[in-house]
Amino acid sequence: MTGVALVSESLERAGFRHGFFLREVVPDWDEACRSLDVARARLFLASQVHGRAVVSVSASDDPTEVRRREADAVLASEAGVACATRVADCAPVLLADPESGAVAAVHSGWRGTVQGVVAAAVEALGGAAVAPRLVAAVGPLIEVCCFEVGPEVAAELAASSPLGDVVVDRSRSRPHIDLRRVVGAQLRALGVEMVEEVRGCTRCDAARFHSFRRDGAASGRLLAAIVARGPGGARFSGVTGGPVVG
């Protein structure tokens, strides 16, 4: 795969600048900003704490101040403002409303998934009234092949999924969780009809992805980002690197 990011065909068709950036992108995210055609001062991340809080941002906000706020979803409705999340095995979820142009970037690790961070982000975008028209893309994460957990965590994640225990692989000595399937099922249960899987296992693929499970404290972080636009909008194809669709 060439380029600096993986992209969602569905978000591209809806006209949203976005990307699930690969590990080669430098830590200060300048290359990501160039690819997204957004000023660094308009790229917003929060202090992620594995919860369900959502922070809304605008162009007048100070990115440094926003970075101090504890939240695991960032929302923007002002055109040209980018929302982002940092991950190293957790699920990055990008959400967009093609009608209003509003977007959200969500960090959904196992704790946030159990607490319903995706539901909080959908609610912040307008809830059930807008859910059927939202476009969601779930990016590279630790896939079921590598996401080994204890029985207590497996039980919590199964309880948080509309699919129940189906998301738990019990064929090995310890449970393995299909986090992608959990998050996708949560989105669909909320009424989101367009859910695209931009695949890749962060732990397996060291050439493209950072992984805390693989590298521990030495692991870097991947960036997933999306830029709000005005109502309507043309197809965007500025981020290099093709989609991986499941």
Image (spheres, grey):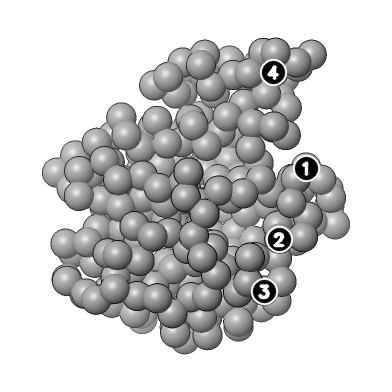
SS class, disc 4: loop
The residue indicated by pointer 2 is 208
Q: CA distance from mark 3 to mark 4?
A: 33 Å
SS under mark 2? loop
222, 200: nearer the viewer: 200
* Crowdedness near tag 3: few (<14), some (14–19) or many (≥20) residues, C-alpha within 10 Å: some
- Residue 50 visible within the image: no
**Residue 167 vertical placement versus 133 (above, below):** above
Q: Which of the two residues, 8 or 64, is positioned nearer the viewer here? A: 8
| Amino acid type, residue under disc 2 in the picture | Arg
Disc with the residue nearer the chain's start (3 vs 4): 3
* C-beta proximity under 8 Å, tags 2 and 4: no
Quote the CA–CA distance across marks 3 and 1: 20 Å
- Front tag of 2 and 3: 2
Q: Which residue is mark 3?
A: 25
Q: Secondary structure at mark 3?
A: loop
SS of the residue under disc 1: helix
Please name the amino acid that badge 3 sits on.
Val
Task: Return the x and y of residue 116 as percentages of the image width and height.
Answer: 43, 34
- Kindly identify which residue carries mark 1: 213
Which residue does the numbered mark 4 point to in the structure image?
175
- Separation of residues labelled 1 and 2 (CA atoms): 15 Å
Determine the CA span between mark 2 and mark 3.
10 Å
Residue 226 position, x and y percent, is 42, 67
Q: Residue at x 47, y 50 (%)?
A: 245
Q: Residues within 10 Å of mark 2 (few under 14, many from 20)?
A: many
